[in-house]
Amino acid sequence: MKTKNNLLVLFAMATVVVVPGTTCAARSQAGGAERTMARWLSMDKDGDGKIAKDEAEGQLKANFEPNDTNKDGFLDRSELNGLSQRLSSGRSQQQSNRSQAVQLAAGAKLERDIVYSQVGGRKLLLDLCLPAKGSAPSPVIVWVHGGGWRNGSKNAGSRARGMLDRGYAVVDAGYRLSGEAIFPAQVEDCKAAVRWVRANATRYGFDPDRIGAWGSSAGGHLVAFIGTAGDVREFDTETNAQYSSRVQAVCDWFGPTDLLQMDRHMIEGSRLVHDEPGSPESLLVGGPIQKEPYKSLAGKANPITYVTKDDPPFLIMHGDKDMLVPLHQSELLLDALKKAGINASLYVVKGGGHGLRGGQESPEKLFEMVADFFDKHLKKPEPVAAPGNRRGARNRPQLRPPTYSNVKYGPHEQNVIDFYKAESDVPTPVAVFIHGGGFRGGSKRGLNAGTLRELLDAGISVAAVEYRFISHAPLPAAHHDSLRALQFIRSKADEWNIDKKRFGAFGGSAGAQICMWLAFHDEMADPSSSDPVKRESSRLTCVATSGGQTTMDFDLWMKWIPGYDKPHRERGETFGKITAEKLRTVLKDISALSILTSDDPPIFMSYGMKPGDPVPADASRAQGWKVHHVMFGIKLKEKMDELGLEADLKYPGAETRYRSDADFFIRKLTPGTE
């Protein structure tokens, strides 16, 4: 051992010899290494030639264990020199990247060294490339570099740069290396970079709902982690915590997953021993990965641990001759994703080593495969005019970027809102949009751009809400989420310039059903709650709906709706496994017809068929026609008329007081227009 250490010291000394003819950068690097080593050795208070933990200071003390590779409780010169080399290598690579002219597509823009987060006094930086073409908002690729978690740096000339030509923005994020901080620091930083994208969507023209992550080697591990643990708050820091860390697509290039299995599946000829104390994996977790407590932390560093059925699509690429990360690592990830029902695929590069080098496919072909994958999952389809004069035949304009995007209002990753702030010197009313989708799909991006523009121009701010689907939790979870969102928006009154007393809600289908529940339910505020959000009122000034179901009792549907002779889905799928008595209680509580009282607000309802229209012959159209039938509106209007409440019902040929949802809200929420 003594001989080995001496050899390491001699090697370390050789690395700082200034050779005639070396560049200024090389001499500066050597001098910097010498100064760093001298500063560390000055901490050796007892002069024994090594540093104990109680002698170490600053970052050296904070990261003492991962750099004490022989676990003797001291940092000797060989260990210090190894750390110095890693840090120097990272700085040298970063300087080299900076010195190279970055070749960007004509018209593309580059911003370097943007601070996306801070940890203590440490600024975390990213480089941003903005595309020359493509209409805003742009989809975004977050590139995460490799280097065994201990080397490498952000590099604006990364492999993802080619996505600029396809209209993507590219974020190249640096993160803390293992010599500075052990796991989960790296994951925390990468998730913070994703949240930075959402927090700055309006400023840079990003689409916060179309973010992909792509990384290689250690970066592949980290983007896989983002994909499976995007909603795991344990790995979130305080930076932009109101935004989601989720991404919508992941490309993992030959990244490790289960660190504890790597050595068992290395191919013949591999020299790296991952279980050794000085391996990249052991340095990542602070000690030998097969010994506790590091073994448990290594298990926690496995992205497979966090796979759930709502994870984004994955494209995994790996060479079958990889001598550093065995192909088996990617096979494990694919198997876990497939078992969870995730859209995932593994492309094995025949003959490809680490970095996919030496394989049969050219780099250009591999890039095209990645680009096509992201296009499929992140690009919006080109708008196509529908045939004839069917509803929606004209192309709908795109939504403008929200003032605040994906603001978290609850613990689930679906609990986010977009807020569009109307320009006003006085507090504005708010119209809350709740999307449809049968409680199984849909998105806040379903907000109509024309309606949004008309409301904002009238001085009405707009919020668009996401909620949990029945695949996440049975009803009434979606209702409770929407209630929380409404109360959360009210709690932002001072910050967002909101008038709490002027709130409307609108939506179609399932969203309409939720809106009516909010409008007609008794006050749901809890004045005694310790949660200030729950103390906010749930009451609305008015409500507008399209194709809304005024009851959720399928027996009444079969009684009232032409051609609806059996429930279109199992009650258990919608409401979960509950008793018949509990089901009756839930149905009554969430159905507008059951909870309507004489003090409820006015409603404007729209439906797409006349009361006497026949059931469409096309079976695919008939189902939606029945579920959104005008009879729902007729039944509600009859009861509201009895109670003396305003209910305006719009359908083809009907005379109505209001021309649209926007017209209704403007007349109900803005003074002097009614």
Image: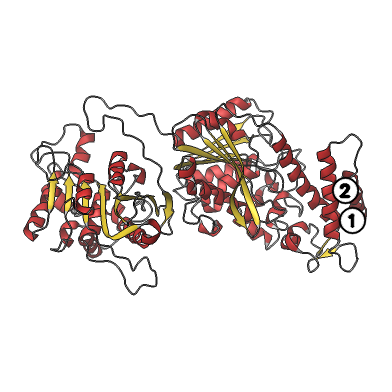
Residue shown at 17% from the left, 47% from the top = 605
The residue lying furthest to the bottom in this view is 528
Residue identified by numbered label 1: 1
Q: Residue 156, percent across and down?
A: 63, 37
Residue 50 image-quadrant placement: bottom right
Report crowding for label 2: few under 14, some 14 to 19, many 20 or more residues within 10 A (C-alpha): some
Left/right of residue 178 with respect to residue 365 in the rendered view? right
Residue shown at 16% from the left, 34% from the top = 616
In this rendering, does residue 334 appear at all? yes
Residue identified by numbered label 2: 12
Q: Residue 309, percent across and down?
A: 44, 48
Q: Nearer the viewer, residue 395 or 191?
A: 395
The residue lying furthest to the front in this view is 425
Badge 2 amino acid = Ala
| Secondary structure found at label 1 | loop
Location of residue 392 with respect to 56 vertically, above or below: above
